[in-house]
Image (spheres, rainbow, N blue to C red):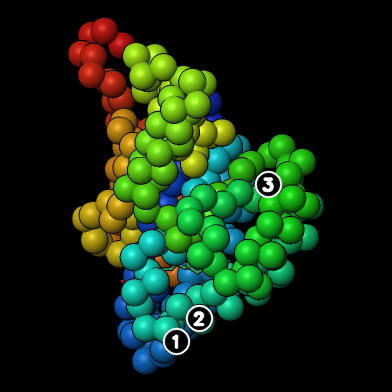
Amino acid sequence: MSDLRKNIDTDRLPKHIAVIMDGNGRWAKKRGGIRLLGHRSGAKAVREVTEACAELGVNYLTVFAFSSENWKRPSKEVSGLMNLLADSLQEEFSTLKDNGIRLNAIGELDRLPEKVSTKLQNTIQNTSDGKRMCLTLALSYSGQWDIIQAAKAFANDVKQNNKAIEDLDIDMFKSYLSTKHMPDPELIIRTSGELRLSNYLLFQMAYAELYFTETLWPDFKKKELYKAILDYQSRERRFGKTSEQL
Ligand code: FPP
């Protein structure tokens, strides 16, 4: 076992880690390759980080695989990413199943091409009994979209007399978000040195610890994850209280 891993206190793991996987394009450029080469290596990093989280006992891992804004990329890159997703779902199904990992997806999934959405729904359904960890793909996702769809669903329930406006509180609002079945992320990781949240889990990350690293996503291996968790464990999480009150 690596020294870094040994130093992790498994009783104080973040239950939910969310990742903004950035830097695939720059990783490919550095090697003189096309952007898709970076995305392919990025998919391998997803595999490695999923494995590391499952081994440690992290319950939820959510990766930002495609944002609502990513539809604006050149159509060749978008279709390349969609093909990669479909292939990865096919290739990784048995590994997910054998390791008790259930797949989940959040976002405007009806915008995905048929071949991705069919594979996605099949994989979600066929891994739904996985108890060890939940891997969520944020696909065609944006935090603002999530908040708006939640607001619309709540307003609709009010209109149907199923809910009263005065009863709305934070927990009730969370029950309308696409992440309703998971705890809020406690650790958000962003790779490649960019210091932005890029419209990720905006409502859910209210108290998350943020970890930024210069490492490009395809180079983010188990060791990098351990470093992020150790950094998280070195912080004092006060949730608005003073140190003395903890
Ligand atoms: C950001 O790098 C990455 C993406 C927009 C896509 C992420 C996709 C993957 C890691 C591969 C597929 C995922 C799964 C779950 C199989 P960038 O292209 O913005 O990089 P750059 O900032 O260096 O240009």
Residue at the farthest bottom position: 32
Q: In the image, is 134 to the left or to the right of 131?
A: left
Q: Residue 79, which numbered label?
A: 2
Query: Where does residue 132 sit, x and y in percent of width and height?
Result: 68, 39
Of pointers 3 and 1, the one earlier in the residue sequence: 1
Residue at the farthest top position: 245
Q: Residue under circle 3? A: 102
Q: Is residue 70 above or below residue 155?
A: below
Q: For the residue carrying disc 2, how many other residues have a C-alpha within 10 Å: few (<14), some (14-19), or many (20+)? A: some
Of pointers 2 and 3, the one earlier in the residue sequence: 2
Q: Is residue 114 above or below residue 204?
A: below
Query: Where does residue 108 sit, x and y in percent of width and height?
Result: 48, 56
Q: Residue under circle 1? A: 76
Q: For the residue carrying disc 3, how many other residues have a C-alpha within 10 Å: few (<14), some (14-19), or many (20+)? A: many
Looking at the image, is mark 3 or mark 1 nearer the viewer?
1
Query: Where does residue 208 sit, x and y in percent of width and height?
Result: 34, 35
**Residue at the location (33% across, 55% down)?**
190
Looking at the image, is mark 2 or mark 3 nearer the viewer?
2
Mark 2 and mark 1 in contact (Cβ < 8 Å)?
A: yes
- Mark 1 vs mark 2, CA separation in Å: 5 Å
Q: Helix or strand or loop: what does disc 3 sit on? A: strand
Q: Amino acid at mark 2?
A: Ser
Q: In the image, is 131 to the left or to the right of 220?
A: right
Q: Helix or strand or loop: what does disc 1 sit on? A: helix
